[in-house]
Amino acid sequence: NCTKARAVVQVATNGGQNQFECTGSKSSNSCVIVQESDGGDNVARCIQKSSQYGESQHQSLVCDIRQVNTTGTNSATVQQTIWQRTEVGKQKAYERTEVEQINGSGTNTVSGVQSVTQYAEADASATQDQNASQSFDVNQDAETGPNNQSLRQLVDQNAVLNGGSYAAAASKP
């Protein structure tokens, strides 16, 4: 099945498979994927990229994935990337992912990367404010199968200012 929806629910029975990839490139977007299978594989991909150039910027990327299985594999891949460049104003970037995987004897696997790059360049009279927030919550529960996860979070903030004031903050709860 093919859809451009931002919220998807897939249910497969008797070894059937669920696959979905959510992509986005807007300054504020979210994706919700719910998959249930009785022995088949659940495969979810959430690929979100956003870039902005100009004055005050606020970007938000949100991905929620829930996978339930009996014996098949639950696989979730997340890539969230925000890029911002400004000459004046505030830069705010927010990336949040929540993954829940429940399985009997099958494997639960999560891999994810969150990346924020902020660059500001301004004259002495400007004020620059850069803020990046990232959270990646994983809840895996398998009765007898293995749980695997690989997560990376990257923040790169650069500011060029001759005089004036500068503030930068990055948070990873």
Image (cartoon, rainbow, N blue to C red):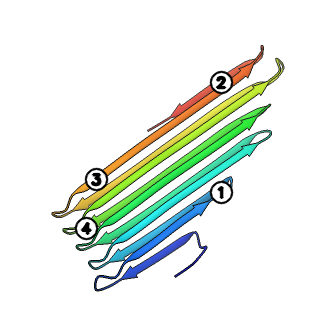
Along the line of sight, the residue nearer the viewer: 16 or 7: 16
Q: What residue type is labelled 4?
A: Asn
Q: Are marks 4 and 3 in contact (CB under 8 Å)?
A: no
Q: Which residue has dot 2 on it? A: 167
Residue 44 left/right relative to 125: left
Q: Is mark 4 on a helix, strand or loop?
A: strand
Mark positioned earlier in the residue sequence (4 or 3): 4
Q: Do the residues labelled 2 and 4 touch (CB within 8 Å)?
A: no
Mark positioned earlier in the residue sequence (2 or 4): 4
Q: Where is residue 118 in the image (x, y as percent from the top left)?
A: 65, 34
The residue under the point 36% across, 75% down is: 36
Q: Distance between the residues labelled 2 and 3?
A: 37 Å
Mark positioned earlier in the residue sequence (3 or 1): 1
Residue 131 left/right relative to 15: right
**Residue 64 against residue 157 in the figure, above or below:** below
Q: Which amino acid does label 2 sit on?
A: Ala
Q: Which residue has dot 1 on it? A: 25
Q: Position of residue 8 (x, y in %)?
A: 51, 74
Other residues around mark 4 within 10 Å, as few (<14) / some (14–19) / many (≥20): many
Q: What element carries label 3?
A: strand
- Mark in front: 2 vs 4: 4
Q: Which amino acid does label 3 sit on?
A: Asn
Other residues around mark 1 within 10 Å, as few (<14) / some (14–19) / many (≥20): some
Q: Distance between the residues labelled 2 and 1?
A: 27 Å
